[in-house]
Image (cartoon, coloured by chain):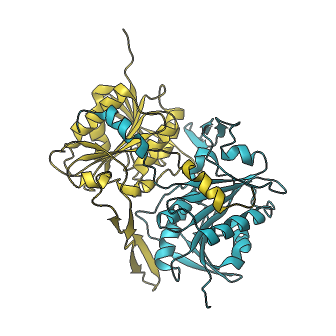
Chain colours: A cyan, B yellow
Amino acid sequence: MNEQKPLILITNDDGIDAPGIRELVGYVKEMGEIVVIAPDEPHSGQSSAISVNRVLRITDRGMLGDARMYSVNGTPVDCVKLGMHAIVPRRPDLILSGINHGSNSGNSIIYSGTMGAVLEGCMLGIPSIGYSYHSHDQAADISCCGEIVRHITSRVIERGLPSDICLNVNIPKCEKVCGIKVVRAARGYWTEEYAEYTDPHGKPFYWLTGKFHNEEPDCPDTDLYWTDRGYASVVPCRPDQSAFDKVTEVKGILSGMD
Amino acid sequence: MNEQKPLILITNDDGIDAPGIRELVGYVKEMGEIVVIAPDEPHSGQSSAISVNRVLRITDRGMLGDARMYSVNGTPVDCVKLGMHAIVPRRPDLILSGINHGSNSGNSIIYSGTMGAVLEGCMLGIPSIGYSYHSHDQAADISCCGEIVRHITSRVIERGLPSDICLNVNIPKCEKVCGIKVVRAARGYWTEEYAEYTDPHGKPFYWLTGKFHNEEPDCPDTDLYWTDRGYASVVPCRPDQSAFDKVTEVKGILSGMD
């Protein structure tokens, strides 16, 4: 037997210098050959954005243990796409994104750059997982994530994932995570979305802020219910947003030009 | 009867100066009171990206007929969010995005800024529709879009949409569109994704390009099948990417830490 170790591509949206990506490499380094390809700079809120009319460059960032590290002057999805095109020595067996400093829970994951990279991996047919920790403090001790990350990553390496889905994992801020719950994203909405200022010339400007209002805080089918109770949540996510179950209803609404 | 006309918020991702948004205003101006809020500059490929750590400003761009126009130095989703917060006189009854200069078909809609704005509208509970025309030539005559846009927009004003979905409409390049087909997004993938160059110092750089390979060109359930045959496609889209139907299967894969 001369079996090749799985190749694991690791990215994030907080950028190559964020502590979370280094922690993630540390947790999974025994499970495969690691290549890190992450944005030069933080790219929170970049969703599945791609750089359409901009030149992309790759910078060799040296080694982290046995893992080779590269950065790209683009978004998380750019890192996956360009990494696949120009960096990885062979097709990765797994793509991991994170550990994000901050929650990617509820239906707000649509804005998440962490999950943008993961959805891209899934569209490329590669099992892909995003990990987020519920604290924005990059100096925080996130070692409670280790057991969860190792369990989920090793299970997915061993057993795979259905080809049309990827995983969004959220780990609450606590000393010891109680366990893992597989659920759906909680529905909610944002309130008080902008802080308002006036510039020295008397003109207004705005800064995004806001609070997420969970519309179903008592529903045990949802991610936020469990992260609020000390569990890690796992939401299976599907890149394809087509609502095929609504085709007949929409045909009725639009009738007259079939 | 002193019924208020519907308020229609119109945005796009090609920017406030693109011809497509002006055409769209022209097609629907009789149907309601129009407010245009679009990016200062082109934002193709921005998906659902939001400006997280950047100051946003609103510029009054005057009138287009009876429609007031504003631009925002941000993404399509920023335009919807900030427009809702600081511009619109009341809650819009409808959000339209487009007419995009170029296709937003198949599973590539995940990158679409046009659809980013539409998905945002849907998450806010407002019926929302994205329109795209299959030519990147901004000087092209797109008048064949008029009949389709008017039909779909008036039907949605009259009959509404299911609350959890929005519509992605693609109009093929042709003189006369044959009709409307409600379908799902075709599955495919991109090949030859980057053009490679060498800078004057001998270092490589990359520019996104590529061809979409449709994996199911003969499937009449899909958008590209019909746009290839002269029909406008309508794909109902769901912002919530949770794959609740896969929860049980994923529980089995991850078992051991429940």
Quadrant, the N terminus of chain A: bottom right
Counting from the top left corner in percent of width and height, residue A176 is at 83, 57
Q: Can residue A44 be seen by looking at this rendering?
A: no
In depth, the one of A242 and A47 nearer the eye is A242
| B132 sits left or right of B52 in the view | left
Quadrant, the C terminus of chain A: top left
Q: Is residue B159 above or below residue A124?
A: above
The residue lying at 71 percent from left, 79 percent from top is: A30
Counting from the top left corner in percent of width and height, residue B29 is at 29, 30
| B203 sits left or right of B248 in the view | left
Q: Can residue A175 be seen by looking at this rendering?
A: yes
The residue lying at 37 percent from left, 41 percent from top is: A247
| B100 sits left or right of A99 in the view | left
Counting from the top left corner in percent of width and height, residue A96 is at 61, 67
Q: Residue furthest top?
A: B1
In depth, the one of A248 and B49 nearer the eye is A248
Q: Is residue B36 above or below residue B115?
A: above
In depth, the one of B107 and B28 nearer the eye is B107
